Each structure stands twice: as structure tokens, then as C-alpha cells.
Amino acid sequence: MHTKTLIATTLLAAAASPAWAAAKNVILFVGDGAGVSSLNAASIYGYGRAQALYLQRLPHMALADTSTAKEWVTDAAAAASAWATGRKGRNGVVSQSPDAERDTKDGETLKTALEFAEEHGLSTGIIANDDRTGVTIAAVAAFYSHINNRQRSAEIFQQLLNPRFGNGPDIVIGTGRKWITDQTSKAGRDLDKDIRAKGYAYLDSLDAAVHLDPSQQRLIALFDDADFDFHLAVDQAIVRLSKNPKGYLLIAFSDCHLGKSAKSLSRIVELDKSVRAAVEKHQEDTLVLVTADHGYDLRIKGEALAETQKSATQRQVLSAISLEDQHTAEEVPVVAAGPGSEMVHGFIANTDIFHYMMNALGFERYRTEARYPVEGTESWDYVTVDSGARRLYVSHETQVEVLNADTGKIVGRIPDTPGVHGIAIAEGSNRGFTSNGRENTVSLFDTETLRLITKIAVGKGPDGIYFDRASKRVFTNNHGSHDITAIDAASGKVAGTVAIEGDGEQAVSSADGLIYVNLEDKSEVAAFDPKTLAVKKRFPIGVGKTPTGLAMDTEHNRLFVACRSGVLAVMDAATGRVITRLPIGSGVDAAAFDAESHLIFASNADGTLNIFEEKSPDRYEDLGSVMTHPSAKTMAFDPQTKRIFLPGADVETIPASDPTQTPQRKVIPGTFSVFVAQRVN
């Protein structure tokens, strides 16, 4: 871990996440282009006064960043993929990881909130009034499809009919009949036949949907009238979806970015009426969210104009609107009502919407429920939990903070650890060790008194440090000398060096007596004998680059290799064969495995914790990601309480005066903390 703190700037950070109310259902309303300036103009245009829209009076509101993984200005595909998956992607790409290239290269398939809902037995629905691609528009397609080009409507619709989880959306109402039919025909398929083969009632109007037998729970109504009664469509979807006692997820999209001011603003007013009806009828058991994919430059301008006076007519107001049709980069509103809406506040990422839905529906296995504040503005790296002693050791640049693992209270400090990266505790003794990266030493300390016993000279740039129970040795991964130093834990003497020829990160001891370590600079996993110090195996990862986190299921001989390229590779430790690869967040720096629950964890600098379940040694299920805190990239898993400890802070990035120099990173005072994630029962 050469870099201790990554760019992770947040303006507001909650001390802890409360036990939010659970929702039976979730409705996400999306207004295309309905940013702050459009809402302002729609209110004045529609009602002759500011903040007259119902959604502007909802109790909970946030402003969401709209950027993609690589672009400041988003399109609907990247925005909706962020809501649907909790991951930022690329413009033009639908629910794939950010290494995808539009129309050229697939990324990792990212599991969506709708797919989670289907997997849990909820009903799901899609409504869209886009005037061309209809219900295959990326703003809703991101919830049910995965493709590297948002324009491939035939393939997108086939994914709706042939879902990865469950039986696909139950209710689909909207436009695009001619477009989707033509595109499907060009692909050599019969749309009517394909739809009916999946058990849907296939209808050609909203009126037909209204009059369909109420017992028919699966319908697709496609037509080409983009001005259909949006409110009626939402109401019909809710009536049918509500028959499922487990609940439902409904995505309702309205195109409010039409290139014509009057029609765009009227669409917002109509969308607002649907929001009002949904909240007033269903807020007791339904989380209602409203947002936009992006803003655009539609605004009322001109302080000296007669047309912008409060006495102006609707026509005059319309003439004062400035309209430039390109998307813009500013934040967009997210407003909410109903159970779980209290989560929505402050400045957020658009990916947080995924977590709001997952949390409200009870799909997330873990939740960040506490924060242990730690004084100081120094950088940090690894954190270690001594489960038996109930102590938490947190690296803090020149010292180690020692906390009570259950309360967060500071119980002491270990000073004089220049550039400390990690801490290792020798089980069965009162000895602990710190790797001091700037001093090329390891501090041996008494775990009871926290006093220094001695300093041990090791290789250059010691980083990761760990204790091996079988050999009773401590090992440091040295990034400067590209080797590993072995230390006898009892005597504190150097026992030798492992010529690993790489920069080791996390390491795990296995049942076969070897220690496996990932080499971030080589994109390899190596194994060595902790007694003879001989390197026994080298496995190229292949499917991932820059491995940093490593965990292991020793019973089944499976390695879980977390890579900075956004992949967690599952590897057979005996042969090096990659069993599968799983998508994870960006900036991963640690992994863990719970042998009892068979859960695998990967902590990421983007403020997420990925969780997977090992269903069998060769089959794994994505359980989604949990919001932690931006920059919380390392973690310690406590096997006793099942809690996960993640140090993080708000970090200010100060541009260098010389553009060729690296920007300065500064921890904002009062923000460094250990965030505690706990299992949700």
C-alpha cells in the first residue's frame, strides 16, 4: 500500500447510520433532465410561484453528484447504472463495470437492485415514455439489462425477457412499440411471439392494460403515444404489483428533456402529480424516491426583463427561458418520503440511491451502524482487531491508536512508529509488532502495557505485516527491497528473508502449511514455506490487475484475490486456476472471509464494502455492496462479533501550484474515524 489515503472528498459525513425504517415497496421516479433549474422553472411556469411543486416540499432531500467513473458529464446510461448497481460506470454503457468501452468491450456484469428484488421474490415494474426507444431507454434498461451500447434495443429487450434472476419485470408499460419491433425483426426475432412465450399479456395501449383481467399479473403494454397518461400508468402498475405480499420495486421514468421548454416543463408538472399521488396513498409502507439523471441548461434568466417579473404571464415567463440542450455536470436533487427516507440528506453520490433502495427493502446483509472518532489529521493504512482481547489497533502515520473494539474508547497509543502501515498480534503471547515504513523497522511492543520492547531492522519499506500461528513467526512485506522479512515472535530476532521478488500486500496462512501473499506489482499470488522461507508457488491472476486484498477459505482451498482493476478473483490455491471473477468497487485494499457464514468481503476506497456468499467452492452469489465511507479502503473482520472495522476520513485535495507535481492530500480535522459495519439480522 504505497498510498495511504486516496482522494475521497466529502462535504457531509454522518457519525453513524441509524436503524432505518424498513419499507415493503420502493418506487423510484426519474425525470430526465429534471435538475434544480428545471424544477425551479417548472414550478414558476406551472403555478406562478417558486417551490410550488409537491416534490419540493417532501421532507427529505439531498443533492447527488452525477459524474461517471471517467466523465464529469453523465448520460442516462451511466446515471441509471449508478442507481441500479451502486457502481459508477461509463457513458453509453448499461450496468457494466467502468472498464467497459462503448460498443467495443464488455465490462463485468453488475447486479442490479431490480435483480436483487426478483431474487427475493418481489414483483417489479418498468414505466417509460421516451419517444423513440421507449422502455429500452437506458434510464430504465439499466435495471434489467447489461450491455456495452445503450442503443442496442433488440438485445436489451431480449434481456428483459430472459433475465439473470427471477422471471424479469412483471409489469412493463410504455412507448417504443414500433422501434423495438423493428429492431427485434432486424435481429431475426418475432417480438410478439417472444413476449407471449414468456407468459406475458401483450397489449398495444394503456387502455387495454386498464381493462385487462385483474388476475393477470404479468403484462407488457407497448405503444407509441409518448403523451399517454403517466399518472394512470403508475396507478395501474401499483395496483397489480401490490398483489404480491412480499412487496415490489417500480421504476417510473418520464422524459422531461425534450428540447422544447413548454413541453419539458409540463412533463415535470405531470410527473410531480404522480409523485404526490404515490406518496399520499402509499407512504406508510413504500419508500418513494425522485431524482434526475442529469441537469441541462434550462433556466429562467434576465433580472431586468419584464418577462421575469412576478406579474408576468405564463407566456412571458416561457419567453424568458434560456435553453441549451446539452447535459450539465452539476448535482441533481434526490427527494424522498416514506420508510427509509431519512437516509436521504446532504451531498451524496448518485450511487447512494442504490443503497437507499437496498437498505429500505432489507437486502443488505451489513450496515454501517457506528463511528469511533480518532483525533488527528495524520494518514492511515491497515487496521487490526485482537478479537480475544477486544482491542482495535489503528495505524496513524507516526503512532498506533489502540481502541476498545466494543466501545471505540481510546485505551492507549503506541508512539514512534514512523510511516506505520500495519500491526500484527502474536497469538498466545503478549507481543505485538508494527511495520514502520519510513524507518525500515518493526516495533516489538508489549500488548498489555503498549510499551516498546525493541525495534527490529527489516527490509526496505515494510508494509503489510502478519503472524503465522504454525511457525510462530511474524512476516513483513517490504516494498522497497521487494522481499519478505521473517521474525521469530518469541525472541524478536530476524529469522531470514523470503526472496519473493515483488511487493506483497495481504497474506493468509493455509491448511497446507504455506503462506499465500498477493504481489501487487506483479499481479500474482505467491506461496512460500514459513519455516524454510522457500517460495513454492507463483500464480498469475490473469483476470485482474494490482491485487491488494487477499482472504482464504482454508477448508476448501479457495483464495479470494481482490484487485484494483475492480475484480475479485476466486482461485484454487492448489493449482492457481481461477474459478470465477466477481465485480467489486474501486480502490480495494483489503479482503476478509468468515468461515461460519461463508461470506467474503472486499473494502473499497469509493466508500463501499462488497459482500459475496460462497454457496459452494465453485459457486458464488453477489449479495451487493454496503455504504461505508469514502476512503475506507482497509478493514479488519472480527470473527467473534462479525463486525467489520474500516478507518476513513474526509480528505481535502489541494492542487499543486506546479501542474507537474502531485496534489496535496489533507485530512480534514475532526473527520478521521473507524467506521463499524455490523450484520443486519
Image (spheres, rainbow, N blue to C red):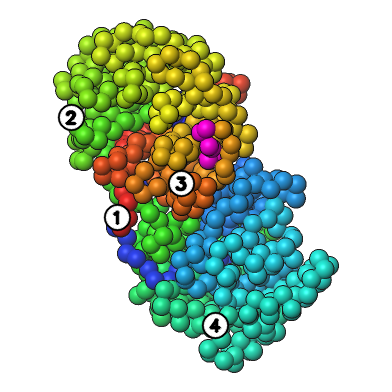
User: At 75% from the left edge and 71% from the top edge, which residue is drawn?
Assistant: 180
Q: State the image coordinates of residue 314 (x, y, percent, origin top left).
A: 60, 75
Distance between mark 3 and mark 2 Cα atoms? 31 Å
Task: Identify the element where label 2 is drawn.
Answer: strand
Q: Which residue is mark 3?
A: 610
How many numbered badges does the structure rendering display?
4
Residue behind mark 1: 18
| Sooner in the amino-acid sequence: mark 3 or mark 4 | 4
Amino acid type indicated by mark 1 = Pro
CA distance separating discs 2 and 1: 26 Å
Alpha carbon separation for disc pair 3 and 1: 20 Å
Which region shows up in magenta?
566-574
Out of 486 and 52, give the one closest to the viewer.
Answer: 486
Which marked residue is nearer to the observer: mark 2 or mark 4? 4
Instruction: First in sequence, mark 3 or 1: give its number.
Output: 1
Label 2 or label 1, whichever comes before in sequence order = 1
Q: Nearer the viewer, residue 475 or 57?
A: 475
Report whether 337 appears left or right of 588. Answer: left
Give residue 457's quadrant in the image: top left
Q: Identify the residue position indicated by label 4 in the image.
A: 217
- On residue 411, the disc is 2
Query: Can you tell which mark lies on residue 123?
Result: none
The residue that appears at 54% across and 18% down in the rendered structure is 502
Q: Where on the picture, by quarter, is residue 493?
A: top left
